[in-house]
Image: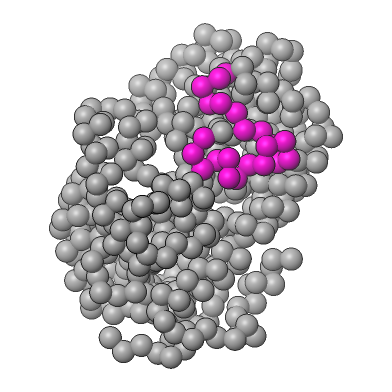
Amino acid sequence: MARSTRVSSCKIAIVTAFPADPATPRGGVEAVSVVLVEALAAFDDLEIHVITTDRGRTHVAASELGRTTIHRLPQQASRVLVDATGPGRKQMHEYLSRLQPDVIHAHDVYGLMVKGLDVPRVLTIHGFIHGDTIVADGRFARARSFLWKRAEAQAWADHPHIISISPYVRERLSGIARGTIHDIENPIAAACFDVKRRERGLIVFSAAVICRRKNTLGLVEAFARVVRAGLDARLRLAGPVTEASYGALVDARIQELGLAGRVDLLGSIDSGAVRRELSAASVFGLVSLEENAPLGIEEAMAAGVPVVASNRCGMPYMVRHGETGYLVDPLDVDDIARRLRQILEDAGRRRAMSESARAIARDRFHPASVARRTRDVYVEAAGVTAAPSSDRTALEAQVS
């Protein structure tokens, strides 16, 4: 495949989950993809193509989103792992062969679909599906986790460039990945940095699906202790129930604890609504059992909301304990409650944490900064000469 000697003609194929409506992404990978694609499209020297698969689709369709072309392929098999390693992979290889990109940038499970292609490739690892499978439990969880782990490890070893969104990812890749690892955190929407803080009472806010892995019940139990300590507070939970039995357990426990009048189950809300919730919140809570680099924490920090998060997996690399929030043992309800109270009871502490969180988030998570570093990886992967800094997008001016 002929390649340019300058990055100005680079055709980038971003192979990822991408929503039908970019304003309403489902889950972290879709949200990251929307923000990253928009930021990368601001570079005049990149030609961006997004390739995704849709369940239920029967034919290939292409459409334009600004300067970006979105290619939608049918999902070939109902089971994700079967699709990504079998008929879905075959379809993706054939489609990319016709598209002839200079660089392929796969996200999450799509890394399995582009495995083995003789094209410069980059893989962003958003999470460890085998680990999530164990925590979520369900039928044959250990067997399914074993199969996922083997498939994921093969993909990690195959890709010549990997974007690690957290030191936690880099640690897990030790001894497996053979390519170059680049440390670049996930971007969030630029609008998150413009949120004006207008607290309305003492509010604990959380944006996450309601399931066992997210440990929603642990946050509810801790909040009950906060209320029993005499604080006039509310807990607002945004996110759909993805495990019906667990959702029923959370509902029942809210009633048993007498919290029906203090806990608001908001369900799925759009990104604008999330930002309005962050504007009013006193603290953001996420006490998951397994996470990589959750966008909810990034968005809260960008909005200047102190965070109480788990002291495991990738979260300790995001929250500076005592500076931007607190890290807690997700299985210790008293620990969670104590840290929530420390933030809720001290307005001065909240203001100091808010200022620190905003400053750190702008440097690490702003889409212009993330897009610039990602573009540099494309340049390295393609083996071309980067355009001089004066040719780079004015989007970078957003980062002060």
Whether residue 326 appears in magenta in the rendering, the answer is yes
Which residue: 53% across, 15% down? 254
Residue 93 percent location from the top left of the image: 21, 68
Residue 319 percent location from the top left of the image: 63, 42
Quadrant in the picture for residue 133: top left
Question: Residue 139 vs residue 186: left or right?
Answer: left
Q: Residue furthest front?
A: 175
Whether residue 52 appears in magenta in the rendering, the answer is no
* Quarter of the image that includes the C terminus: bottom right
Q: Which residues are magenta?
A: 312-333
Residue 201 percent location from the top left of the image: 76, 28
* Quarter of the image that includes the N terminus: bottom left
Residue 13 percent location from the top left of the image: 36, 71
Q: Is residue 22 above or below residue 322?
A: below
Which residue: 33% across, 64% down? 159
Q: Is residue 30 above or below residue 317?
A: below
Question: Residue 300 vs residue 377: left or right?
Answer: right
Secondary structure mostly taken by the magenta-highlighted segment of the chain: loop
Which residue: 37% across, 44% down? 128
Q: Is residue 245 visible?
A: yes
Which residue: 78% across, 24% down? 345
Q: Is residue 227 above or below residue 138?
A: above
Q: Is residue 200 above or below residue 55?
A: above
